[in-house]
Image: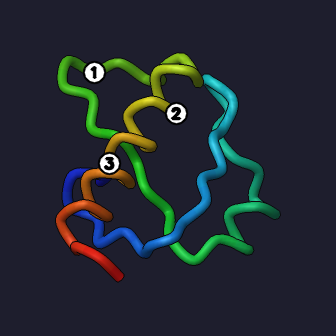
Amino acid sequence: LLHRAQLPWPCGWILGHEGQGVSDALQQRATHLIRIAQPGGEESLNVGAAAAICLHASAAHADAAGPG
């Protein structure tokens, strides 16, 4: 889950299609597989919303790590 992940810096994000996710081939190449918690049972987020959440998490982790 994103809120528990130890994100590397810098990092890149691969965002999947709203119902189908990321292909198996891309998942096999990834170093981390992360989901965004969705209370209430929603199956997926709009890709723009998912990107905003992930990029915010990256920035927050980088800020917390300090100058590097």
Q: Amino acid at mark 2?
A: Ala
> Dot 3 surroundings within 10 Å: few (below 14), some, or many (20 or more)?
some
Cα–Cα gap, marks 1 and 3: 22 Å
Q: Is residue 31 above or below residue 43?
A: below
Check residue 51 in the rendering and tell me which mark sits there, or answer none. Answer: 2
Q: Dividing the image into 4 quarters, which one contains the C terminus?
A: bottom left
Q: Mark 1 or mark 2, which is nearer the start of the sequence?
A: 1
Name the residue located 75 percent from the left edge and 59 percent from the top edge.
24
Q: Is residue 24 above or below residue 47?
A: below
Work out whether residue 48 or residue 61 is closer to the camera in this orientation and state it.
61
Report the residue marked by disc 1.
Answer: 41
Q: Amino acid at mark 1?
A: Gly
Name the residue located 76 percent from the left edge and 50 percent from the top edge.
23
Tags 2 and 1 touching, CB below 8 Å: no
**Quadrant housing residue 65:** bottom left
Left or right of residue 5: residue 47: right
Q: Mark 2 or mark 3, which is nearer the start of the sequence?
A: 2
Cα–Cα gap, marks 2 and 1: 20 Å
* Numbered disc in front, either 1 or 3: 3
Left or right of residue 53: residue 6: left
> Dot 1 surroundings within 10 Å: few (below 14), some, or many (20 or more)?
few
Task: Provide residue 25's location: percent of width, then percent of height.
Answer: 81, 63
How many numbered circles are shown?
3
Check residue 57 in the rendering and tell me which mark sits there, or answer none. Answer: 3
Left or right of residue 50: residue 38: left
Name the residue located 35 percent from the left edge and 40 percent from the top edge.
56
Q: Is residue 2 above or below residue 48?
A: below
Cα–Cα gap, marks 3 and 2: 10 Å
Q: Amino acid at mark 3?
A: Ala
Q: Dividing the image into 4 quarters, which one contains the N terminus?
A: bottom left
Work out whether residue 58 or residue 19 is closer to the camera in this orientation and state it.
58
**Quadrant housing residue 39:** top left
